[in-house]
Image (tube, rainbow, N blue to C red):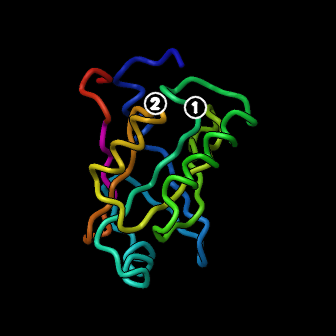
Amino acid sequence: MSKSPESLADAYRLARYRVLAEPTFVLRIGQYCPELAAWQAANRVVETAFLTAANPGSRLLSDNENLVRHEQLIALVEGFPAAPGRGEDPDHQWPDEPSLLIGGLPVSKAQDLARRFGQNAFVHIGLDACPRLIWTSEEIL
């Protein structure tokens, strides 16, 4: 991806983080999500992460490569409550990315996983059900 750091940051902040639970809901950075609050309460968790293993460093991989990486992520969070999801670019300039909403995952573990899969950032949500973008490195911006 040949975006400037500022436009990359904007793309992450404006992305839609869709959770394919029942009911389906969308996370937006900085906006309270009542459906997420209900999901967290139902799963008895006080923090949640929305992670992808796809397209590390905002570099496009094939669908097959992304699927393998996604399956690896699923295996690494086995035992945590989770729901499938996908990251969506509202401008449709970037393909949807398979993702996971993972309940009860400490922010430090989420950051370790995001780094392991070469991600620039991930979404963390506390008990307030307000998604926040967490960068994996200060060098990105």
Question: What residue is rendered at 24% in x and 26% in y?
Answer: 138
69 relative to 64 in the view: left or right? left
22 relative to 138 in the view: left or right? right
95 shown above or below 28 = above
In the image shown, does 29 or 111 lie closer to the viewer? 111
Q: Which residues are magenta?
A: 131-135
Residue 34 in the image: state x and y as whole percent. Answer: 39, 76
Q: Which residue is mark 1?
A: 55
Q: Residue furthest right?
A: 64
Residue 78 in the image: state x and y as whole percent. Answer: 52, 62
Question: What residue is rendered at 40% in x and 17% in y?
Answer: 4
The number of discs equals: 2
Residue 91 in the image: state x and y as whole percent. Answer: 59, 38
Q: Main secondary structure of the magenta part?
A: strand
- For disc 1, the neighbor class at 10 Å (few under 14, some 14 to 19, many from 20) is many
Residue 57 in the image: state x and y as whole percent. Answer: 48, 26
Considering only order in the chain, which callout, 2 or 1, is on the residue closer to the N terminus? 1
> For residue 42, which quarter of the picture?
bottom left
Q: Which residue is mark 2?
A: 118
In the image shown, does 93 or 105 lie closer to the viewer? 105
47 shown above or below 12 = below
